[in-house]
Amino acid sequence: MGSFVFKIILVGDYGVGKSTSIHRFVENKFRANYVPTLGVQITKKSIIIEENNIDLLIWDLAGQDRYAMVRQRFYSDTEGILMLYDITRMSSLEHIKKWYAEVSKYTKPVPIILIGNKIDLVDKREVTDDDLTRILEENNIKVRLKLETSAKEGVKIEEAFHFLVKTLMQKYNQSNAF
């Protein structure tokens, strides 16, 4: 039917599973060793959704504070965001307000999918649904979808990316309707 190219970015604190989620989505593999992203890592994946050819340019932005100035440059032309936190680290959820402010400052309004990663670590969970609701409401954070995932086990990773792509396709088709 059509061809699309979308730039999507993943943001969140270091160690929340951005790179691992991308690796799971692109390669369908889990990478156990943690290697921090330095600056930005760009990955391309082609998929077909509803008979449309989609090329995704997936930007993995470093989560460490020392890269904040560098990150600003990479936000231009972003069309969708996967914002991650780690369900075993309350601080990573609390920092979502900082990430939301940053992306709001450097991007036009784009769909955001909020992902609580590492649900395979059930006994280490620190974040509850109530915590999530409180943080979103207190900071007036608007997201298109909230999901909990496991990049390690591959739980709902593909669903997160596909939901974002379908949202972008809808937005594109509506803006180009006659």
Image (spheres, rainbow, N blue to C red):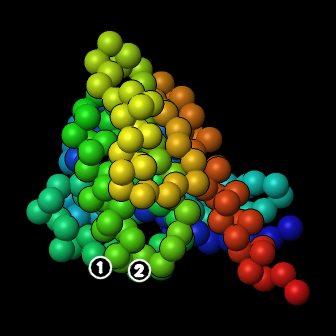
Expressed as whole percent of the image width and height from the top left, the position of residue 8 reads: 49, 64
Work out which quarter of the rendered image holds the C terminus and state it: bottom right
Rendered image: mark on residue 112: none
The image shows a total of numbered marks equal to: 2
Residue 46 left/right relative to 152: right
Q: What element carries label 1?
A: loop
Q: How crowded is mark 1: few (under 14 residues within 10 Å), some or many (20 or more)?
A: few
Tell me what residue is drawn at x 57 percent, y 48 percent.
145
Residue 107, position as x, y percentages in the image: 42, 76
Q: Are marks 2 and 1 in contact (CB under 8 Å)?
A: yes
Image coordinates of residue 80 in percent, x first then y, are 52, 64
Where residue 20 sits in the image (x, y, percent)? 38, 40
Which residue is situated farthest in the front direction here?
Answer: 138
Residue 17 seen in the figure: no
Relative to 79, 100 lies left or right: left
Q: Is residue 8 above or below residue 84?
A: below
Q: What residue type is labelled 2?
A: Ser
Q: Residue at horizontal 26%, vertical 70%?
A: 71
Between 58 and 109, the residue placed more toward the observer is 109
Rendered residue at 58%/54% (across/down): 144
Q: How packed is label 2: few (under 14 Cα within 10 Å), some, or many (20 or more)?
A: few
| Label ID, residue 76 | 2
Calculate the distance from the C-alpha at mark 2 to the C-alpha at mark 1.
Answer: 7 Å
Is residue 127 among the parts visible in the rendering? Answer: yes
Horizontal relation, residue 137 to residue 28: left or right: left
Residue that badge 1 annotates: 73
Q: Is mark 2 on a helix, strand or loop?
A: loop
Q: In the rendered image, which quarter is residue 140 located in?
A: bottom left
Nearer to us in this view, 50 or 167 = 167
Could you say which quadrant of the image residue 45 lies in? bottom right
